[in-house]
Amino acid sequence: MNLNEIAISSGKQIFHSKSWNIGIQDEMIACLLQEARINENNKARLCLHPNAEETMQVTYLAFVAPYEDSIHCHPWRPEVLIPIRGEAVARTFDSNGNMLKSELMIGGTGHAFATESGQWHSLKVKTSDFVMIEIGIGPFRPDSTVFQNRRDR
């Protein structure tokens, strides 16, 4: 199996499900991790929503180490993260880039992590790979994510 059997690629290791009716199996997670390994950003995503215009957006994200994303926020959408496999640190920041909180996310525990609209945050993978589900509000627009200027922390 490959992701093209269930999804349409929109480039840069981003796949959109052909319909809402797919079930995610271990083999699909393995395919998503393989896509992350060949991506220069060490990341791949499978959007269960068929297109970026959907109001509900559910995405499986796969990361391979080393991975750390830039501090960013979603000005008009909260999000919920559910770790599936591996470990990562979820961090929140104030508007000056000072860390407010750091939480270890461990896959398979059933714990969810929520981020409010406008909350600066980032993710750092701690294990060789990490997979999570991200749930947010759509539609996706170019201004859905804003990045904070990077500074040494």
Image: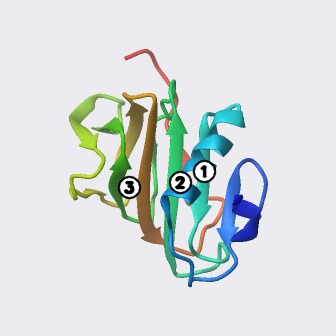
Report whether residue 64 is seen: yes
| Label 3–label 2 contact, CB within 8 A | no
Q: Is residue 57 above or below residue 126?
A: below
Residue bearing mark 2? 29
| Distance in Å between CA atoms under marks 1 and 3 | 29 Å
Q: Secondary structure at mark 1?
A: helix
| Distance in Å between CA atoms under marks 3 and 2 | 30 Å
Q: Is residue 62 above or below residue 21?
A: above
Q: Residue at x 36, y 28 (%)?
A: 126
Label 2: how many residues lie within 10 Å, few (<14), some (14-19) or many (20+)?
Answer: many
| Residue 150 x, y percent position in the rendering | 50, 25
| Residue 96 x, y percent position in the rendering | 35, 31
Rendered image quadrant of residue 90: top left
Q: Residue at x 49, y 36 (%)?
A: 148
Label 3: how many residues lie within 10 Å, few (<14), some (14-19) or many (20+)?
Answer: some
| Residue 79 x, y percent position in the rendering | 38, 62
Residue bearing mark 1? 32
Rendered image quadrant of residue 6: bottom right
Label 1: how many residues lie within 10 Å, few (<14), some (14-19) or many (20+)?
Answer: many
Is residue 110 toward the left or the right of residue 60 in the image? left
Residue bearing mark 3? 118
Labels in figure, total: 3
Which disc, if any, is residue 20?
none
Q: Is 69 in front, or is 125?
A: 125
| Label 2–label 1 contact, CB within 8 A | yes
Q: Quadrant of the C terminus?
A: top left
Amino acid type at mark 1 = Leu
Q: Secondary structure at mark 2?
A: helix
